[in-house]
Image (tube, grey):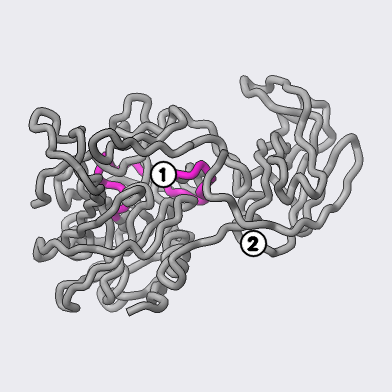
């Protein structure tokens, strides 16, 4: 089981080979919320057999708009109906490393070598598949098993973006074997909405679980340590092997990509997270077009200023983003943004104080660090951003040229 809470991602690839990826607090692109027990649900390591270029048409209504929706009379579809419609488009993903050894028959989920297994789903009639970046990370070859006929195909990795934990694979299969899923609009998701997750937990292919949306607009961490905004929290059980699989609403549309669980023990406790499908759609289009994604980068970490913290600090502002650190050599450092130089404890949380407080971005008031993250993520490398900074009773505006985000968080 991969445990992100320890700051290191370790996965066995073969004899003597271990992949380690730093996984620490994010520099903007964002602040990482400090939750313990993050677990990537990418997959157990198993060896058992599972029972043309161009932009993809990834509009919210494609490709099953004619059939995806509520049942006759406007009622929501049952879990069984959703599964019957969606399962053919959900796939089993196996990411393999050269030189992998035979599995351990006494511990099939943690062999000395083998394949990382996960899930994914078809997004178009060209055989393109969305999955998680941490499912395919570090592998040398890939196989995809389709849900309808059980046929296995070699797959090509078109691109992977660790910052959003999204990757795109492509297979060469006959059109009649491909049943892509309809993509919904994750901005319409509300707490309490029923959802169905389809995936391959522990290699048990095409398993459906159901639950509700527990919360929206969560912040989770990508495999490179940067923040993923707008994650959907669910209580539908998801486990290792569900990574990359579709989260589906009551109308049969994909609204998220199942990615992580939060757990103190490594097992499912009913707190799972999915990358919103609007993020996945945008990233997939870029990966299909160019094979890579560039994110704008400022180079700070920050913390929310709340009324309680403001009272402790005796500030005359009650909202904003307190700059906690500034990475040397970044746009933020070159613009003279300063982090706090002292530490106080407020509400049981240590906060660095004495630095800049971001109170507006491009003229829009900032309520929290999430607003700053969202503003940066809406930009591209080379774009300008204007920050209004407050310190020692004075405000000042700075205009900054954003750079491209580094490949991973230090």
Majority SS type along the magenta span: loop
Indicate which disc residue 233 carries.
1
**Mark sitting on residue 141:** none
Q: Residue at x 38, y 55 (%)?
A: 256
* Residue for point 46% across, 70% down: 290
Question: Quadrant where the C terminus lies?
Answer: top right
- Residue hosting label 2: 381
Cα gap from disc 1 to disc 2, whole angstroms: 30 Å
Local crowd at mark 1 within 10 Å, few (<14), some, or many (≥20)? many
Say if residue 381 shows up in the picture.
Answer: yes
Compared with residue 303, is residue 52 higher up or lower down, i.e. above or below?
A: below
x 30%, y 73%: residue: 124
The region drawn magenta spans 223-245
As helix, strand or loop, the secondary structure at mark 2 comes to loop
Which residue corresponds to the image point at 14% horizontal and 43% vertical from the top-left?
A: 47
Relative to 375, is 226 above or below? above
Q: Is mark 1 on a helix, strand or loop?
A: strand
Q: Position of residue 118 (x, y in %)?
A: 25, 49
Of residues 293 and 185, which is closer to you in this image? 293
- Indicate left or right for 174 with 124 as reference: left
Report the front residue among 143 and 199. 143
Q: Quadrant of residue 402?
A: bottom right
């Amino acid at each position: 089981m991969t445990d992100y809470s320890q700051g290191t991602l370790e996965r066995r690839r073969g004899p003597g080979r271990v992949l380690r990826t730093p996984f620490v607090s994010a520099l903007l692109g964002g602040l990482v919320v400090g939750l313990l027990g993050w677990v990537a649900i990418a997959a157990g390591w198993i060896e058992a057999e599972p029972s043309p270029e161009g932009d993809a048409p990834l509009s919210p209504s494609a490709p099953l708009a004619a059939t995806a929706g509520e049942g006759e009379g406007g009622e929501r579809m049952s879990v069984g109906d959703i599964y019957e419609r969606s399962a053919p488009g959900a796939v089993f993903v196996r990411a393999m490393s050269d030189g992998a050894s035979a599995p351990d028959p006494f511990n099939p989920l943690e062999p000395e070598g083998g394949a990382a297994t996960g899930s994914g789903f078809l997004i178009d009639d060209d055989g393109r598949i969305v999955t998680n970046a941490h499912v395919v990370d570090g592998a040398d070859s890939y196989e995809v098993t389709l849900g309808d006929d059980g046929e296995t195909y070699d797959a090509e990795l078109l691109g992977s973006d660790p910052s959003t934990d999204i990757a795109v694979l492509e297979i060469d299969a006959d059109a009649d074997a491909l049943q892509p899923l309809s993509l919904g609009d994750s901005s319409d998701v509300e707490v309490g909405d029923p959802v169905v997750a389809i995936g391959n937990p522990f290699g048990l292919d095409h398993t459906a679980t159901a639950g509700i949306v527990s919360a929206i607009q969560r912040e989770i961490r990508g495999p490179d340590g940067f923040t993923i905004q707008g994650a959907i929290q669910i209580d539908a059980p998801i486990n290792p092997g569900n990574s990359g699989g579709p989260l589906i609403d009551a109308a049969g549309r994909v609204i998220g990509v199942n990615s992580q669980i939060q757990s103190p023990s490594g097992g499912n406790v009913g707190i799972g997270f999915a990358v919103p499908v609007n993020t996945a759609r945008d990233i997939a289009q870029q990966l299909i077009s160019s094979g890579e994604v560039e994110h704008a980068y400022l180079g700070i970490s920050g913390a929310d200023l709340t009324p309680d913290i403001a009272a402790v600090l005796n500030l005359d502002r009650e909202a904003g983003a307190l700059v906690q650190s500034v990475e040397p050599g970044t746009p933020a450092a070159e613009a003279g943004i300063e982090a706090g130089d002292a530490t106080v404890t407020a509400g049981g949380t240590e906060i660095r104080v004495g630095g800049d407080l971001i109170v507006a971005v491009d003229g829009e008031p900032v309520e929290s660090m999430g607003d700053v993250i969202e503003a940066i993520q809406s930009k591209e490398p080379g774009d300008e951003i204007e920050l209004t900074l407050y310190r020692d009773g004075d405000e000042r505006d700075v205009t900054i040229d954003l750079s491209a985000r580094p490949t991973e968080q230090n």
